[in-house]
Structures are given as C-alpha cells and as structure tokens.
Amino acid sequence: MFKNDNRMTVILLLLFVLALMIIAVMCLDVAISESETEDAYIICNPESIVNIHANPKKKSAVEGGFYAGTLIHLDGKKKNGFYHCVNVSNETGEGWVSSKYVVFDEPTFPNCQAIVVSKGRLAARASVNGKRIRWLKPGNTVFIYCQTEEWAVTDKGYVKTEYLEVIGDKNEIN
C-alpha cells in the first residue's frame, strides 16, 4: 500500500507542475502579444480616409477606414508595404494599412500657412516617403493641414517639416 501512495503522490505532483507550466506559458504568451503591439498614427489630409484592407494588397477588400490622427496598434507584421493593425473597429478586429500613411509620433493639426525655407528645391510627395508629385522652390507658400515632427501634409503634398517655417494661421490666408 505504501508503494501505491508514493506513485499517486508523484503522479499528482507531476500533474500539478505540468498545470503550472501551462499557466505560465499562457501568461507569457499574453504578455508577449501585448508588448509586441506598437502605437502609430495615421497622417493624411483631414478630409481623406486611409483604407483598412483585408489583406496586404492594394486591391484587396476595403473593410473600413482611418481618419487623420487616428491612433492605431501595429503587431509587428509588415508585408508588401502594409502594416498589420490589431484592435481595429471592423468585423474581424484586424486589418492592413498602407505604410505610406503611418507615422510613429502623434500628428497635430495646425491649419497654418508656411514658407519653404530649403536651400534648393523641395520635393512634395504623394505620401510619407512616397512618389514625388512636384517641386517646391524656396519662398513658396503652403498650407499645413496636419503635421508630425518629420512630415507635414500640405495643400501641395507631403513635405519634410524641417524645410518649412510657419508664417500665419488659417485666418490670415487670402
């Protein structure tokens, strides 16, 4: 009888250790998934919407949209120039957004006029690091709708903020 009690005790102890290990792995998995999300923001013209796609493809189904300044949560997946977002308010709770409209510092909406202060011409782009759509010359004026420390969404396109100097608010524009 003593041998059977020892075996039962060992089996119960092993089951208890196994249960503790399973709980530890589950807690670790939750902690890792929560810590792997990164906050980011949408930057675009305030009158526009950036699409949430079902897949990381430009022509995949659109499942919603983000407005300028929206806080989004990225889980670290990036494919074909798209970031995977979690905690999205659509049916699946996730989606893909073009990296062209994602920044990592919170945008502001100054609604002001600025002058180009670069030493040479300045590229105005279709999106963050996107295709150049026009050249701006020093002294040209732009209207800033939305900006971060690095990028400004202007009436002429996306430009680097380091080459802009604010000269007036929206009430001073002719």
Image (spheres, rainbow, N blue to C red):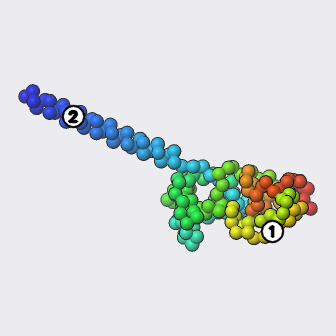
Q: From this viewpoint, is residue 52 visible?
A: no
Q: Residue 57: name its quadrant.
A: bottom right
Q: Is residue 57 left or right of residue 162?
A: left
> Residue 131 or 110: which is nearer the viewer?
131
Q: From this viewpoint, is residue 66 visible?
A: yes
> Is disc 1 placed on a helix, strand or loop?
strand
> Is disc 2 placed on a helix, strand or loop?
helix
Residue type marked 2: Leu
> Residue at (44%, 44%) from the top-left corner?
30
Residue type marked 1: Trp
**Quarter in which the N terminus is drawn:** top left
> Residue at (39%, 43%) from the top-left corner?
26
Q: Position of residue 76 (x, y in %)?
A: 53, 54
> Residue reaching furthest left?
1
Q: Which residue is mark 1?
A: 135
Query: Could you tell me how many numbered marks the image carries?
Result: 2
Q: Which residue is mark 2?
A: 12
Q: Position of residue 23 (x, y in %)?
A: 36, 40
**Quarter in which the C terminus is drawn:** bottom right
